[in-house]
């Protein structure tokens, strides 16, 4: 029988079992693969449903909104019903929702299935990561998180070409059916090896805090989706955005005054966590999260590539991401977090802008080099941000930090996809055209790349010795 963990365990003294880390990583692989294979198949899916590719931002956004809205529920549910129980149930729901996505006969049905997927992911990923965080000592945390992220990096590597090949030579529905065997294997391993942690006493569910947070996130993200459509509804979008902001402010006030809030805001008092996860880190993820959405569409719609060819080019971008990820740890150990994040942030912004002007029909070798470099610097920044997030978070705040770390970055990624779609449609209206062209993507990449540069400059607010216990680079006396 798997051992129990206390609600807030003391600082661990041994590394989390490698087996447990790999189990979590395999499940994250399933989730990440599902999110990457869909992008290269969007034009084919759009033709199947009789809509445009940008209209299909809603299934992507719906998934991200549900994931962000229900992440706060994950910690309470795991403490109430057990971490293994919630983790296994989430795997089952995610797999069944994947089948429903493949069987969808309309955009409405696809959105409904993606909503169920997002809900399952909201329970699955935070609980899995929290188990690893709680069982890993601080000195080993960066290595543990990096190891756990490898399969989730392989998924974006194989996802785009895999999705492109399926969309080109088979049926796009098979990109969802692949989750069936992965879900079955993940479920068996979870039931066998994941610890069954429950809180020693039942905590009341903060229904007010959950409702305010969920409504805030859903309204803000959906307002961006409304603006991204061809028949944009700016008035309704503005109302939803205002409601979202108001509910967000109320949820923060509630979290500060409630005796047992659903989300603990205590970790926001920790400078490294606040910058890496809430402020500069969120801005960086907002910008870089738009790349997997923009790039495949640009190669297919602006330059006429097939889904398979577009996927192979994204493969090069993800290969750079995968190749330089191990380098990030060594760079952090050598120079520290602050120089790494500032340099990587600026480089990410510059390379994003450059990617918007890559023409695969003219100079393919240059395109391949540019994509590899862009993917590499993006990986260095994301790896360093993830490692710094928990660098100074004590055991008593790890539960709350884990929730905030999932809610805020997920919100940023969702907003990044929505903002990218808004920029494309804005450019279309400015040109008075009905068809996306290279210029529209130039505008989007320049705008999002500029935001990434701002994030890089924001990291200068870190202390010179930030996260030295994790990086191993002791501050100079």
Image: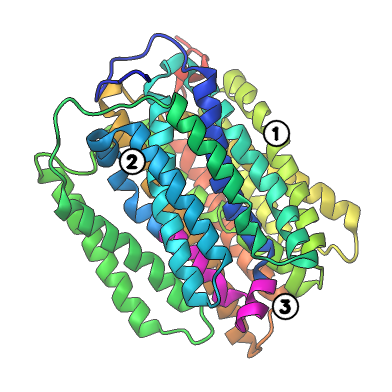
Residue at position x 49%, y 12% in the image: 474
Q: Quadrant of residue 126?
A: top left
The numbered mark, 2 or 3, whose residue comes first in the sequence reads: 2
Q: Main secondary structure of the magenta part?
A: helix
Q: Of tags 1 and 2, which is closer to the observer?
A: 2
Q: Using the image, tell me which numbered label, if any, was put on residue 403.
A: 2
Can you identify the residue that label 1 sits on?
324
Q: Which mark is residue 178?
A: none
User: Which quadrant is the C terminus positioned in?
Assistant: top left
Comparing labels 2 and 3, the label whose residue is closer to the camera:
2
Q: Which stretch appears magenta?
A: 43-65
The span from disc 3 to disc 1 (Cα, nearest Å) is 32 Å
Residue 202 visible in the shown view: yes
Question: Which numbered disc covers residue 437?
Answer: 3
| Residue 462 shows up from this direction | no
Q: Is residue 62 shown in magenta? A: yes
């Amino acid at each position: 029988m798997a051992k129990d963990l206390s609600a807030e365990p003391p600082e661990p003294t041994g590394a989390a079992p490698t087996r447990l880390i790999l189990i979590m990583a395999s499940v994250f692989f399933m989730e990440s693969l599902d999110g990457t294979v869909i992008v290269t198949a969007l034009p084919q899916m759009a033709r199947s449903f009789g809509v445009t590719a940008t209209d299909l931002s809603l299934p992507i956004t719906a998934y991200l909104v549900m994931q962000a809205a229900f992440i706060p529920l994950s910690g309470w549910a795991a403490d109430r019903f057990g971490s293994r129980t919630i983790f296994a149930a989430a795997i089952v729901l995610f797999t069944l929702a994947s089948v429903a996505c493949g069987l969808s006969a309309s955009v409405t049905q696809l959105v409904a299935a993606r909503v169920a997927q997002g809900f399952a992911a909201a329970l699955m990923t935070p609980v899995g990561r929290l188990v690893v965080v709680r069982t890993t000592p601080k000195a080993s945390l960066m290595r543990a998180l990096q190891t756990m992220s490898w399969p989730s990096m392989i998924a974006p590597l194989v996802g785009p070409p895999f999705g492109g090949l399926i969309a080109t030579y088979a049926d796009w529905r098979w990109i969802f059916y692949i989750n069936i065997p992965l879900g079955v294997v993940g479920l068996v391993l979870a039931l066998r090896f994941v610890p069954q942690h429950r809180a020693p006493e039942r905590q009341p569910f903060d229904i007010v805090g959950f409702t305010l947070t969920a409504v805030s996130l859903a309204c803000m993200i959906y307002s961006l989706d409304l603006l991204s459509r061809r028949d944009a509804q700016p008035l309704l979008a503005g109302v939803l955005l205002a409601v979202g902001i108001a509910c967000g402010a109320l949820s923060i006030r509630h979290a500060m005054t409630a005796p047992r809030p659903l989300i603990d805001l205590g970790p926001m008092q920790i400078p490294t966590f606040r910058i890496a996860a809430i402020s500069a880190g969120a801005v960086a993820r907002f910008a870089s999260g738009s790349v997997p959405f923009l790039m495949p569409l640009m190669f297919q719609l602006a330059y006429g590539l097939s889904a398979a060819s577009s996927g192979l080019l994204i493969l090069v971008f993800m290969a750079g991401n995968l190749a330089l990820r191990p380098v990030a740890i060594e760079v952090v150990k050598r120079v520290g977090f602050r120089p790494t994040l500032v340099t990587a942030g600026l480089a990410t912004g510059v390379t994003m802008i450059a990617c918007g002007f890559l023409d695969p029909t003219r100079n393919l070798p240059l395109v391949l080099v540019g994509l590899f470099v862009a993917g590499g610097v993006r990986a260095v920044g994301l790896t360093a941000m993830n490692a710094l997030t928990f660098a100074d978070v004590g055991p008593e705040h790890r539960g709350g930090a884990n929730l905030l770390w999932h809610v805020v970055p997920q919100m940023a990624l969702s907003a990044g996809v929505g903002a990218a779609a808004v920029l494309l449609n804005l450019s279309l209206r400015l040109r008075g055209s009905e068809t996306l062209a290279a210029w529209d993507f130039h505008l989007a990449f320049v705008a999002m790349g500029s935001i990434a540069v701002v994030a890089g400059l924001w990291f200068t607010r870190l202390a010179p010795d930030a996260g030295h216990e994790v990086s191993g680079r002791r501050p100079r006396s």
